[in-house]
Amino acid sequence: PGSAQTGGYYGFNGNWHTQENKGINFLTSFNSVEDSVSRLKTAHVEDGKILLFWEVWTETAYKYSQMMVVDDSGVEQTSPWSLAYPVRLAIQDDLHVKGGRAVAYAGSPDGLLIRYELCSGGDCPAAGGLPTPMPVPAPTPATPTPAPSMPVPAPTPAPPTPSPPVPTPAPVPPTPAPPTPAPPTP
């Protein structure tokens, strides 16, 4: 299903190469850059049912998020609808499927990790349900106190070695007085 589009491109050799793409299904019809699809995500939620999620942006800012369902050939099963909540997902992240619902995670501006479950039709809970309560943090596991053990003796440091004594010069005997001549004998 879908139309064929012809066009082409310039190759590395600088020549024009004609190209035809068959089976194109245009799912949106935005006419200006003030409404542009970005961050498209797909989730094969069941046989014949692919949930599409995308964000609508201006040239510079997020506006809103939309979803729709297509079959395995890309044929629209439900028209696009806008989400009431500003679901913004990381550009490189993929959707995961659990229990027929698309699951995504994203960080919030206040540092929380948010889990989104995206669904369509009868897979969705009734409107007006209460939001999932915030989880209570798990208690910090107690670490066992180690059994007491005998202290390991530490060697007593040796007293500091005294500095070698400064040698004192040997006493110098006094210089004897010159001998006095003996008195003359009579």
Image (tube, rainbow, N blue to C red):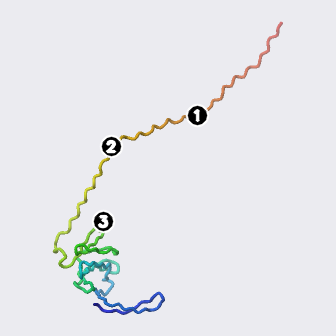
Q: Where is residue 121 in the image (x, y as percent from the top left)?
A: 19, 79
Q: Earlier in the sequence, mark 1 or mark 3?
A: 3
Q: Can you tell which quarter of the image residue 39 is in?
A: bottom left
- For label 1, the residue is 164
Q: Which of marks 1 and 3 is in front?
A: 1
Q: Which of marks 2 and 1 is in front?
A: 2
Q: Which of marks 2 and 3 is nearer the N terminus?
A: 3
Residue 173 or 183: which is nearer the viewer?
Answer: 173
Q: What residue type is labelled 3?
A: Gly
- For label 3, the residue is 111
Q: Earlier in the sequence, mark 2 or mark 1?
A: 2
Disc 1 and disc 3 in contact, CB within 8 angstroms: no
Point out which mark residue 148 bears: 2
Q: Position of residue 132 (x, y in %)?
A: 20, 67
The Cα–Cα distance between marks 1 and 3, rounded to whole angstroms, is 69 Å
Q: Which amino acid does label 2 sit on?
A: Pro
Q: Can you tell which quarter of the image residue 186 is in?
A: top right
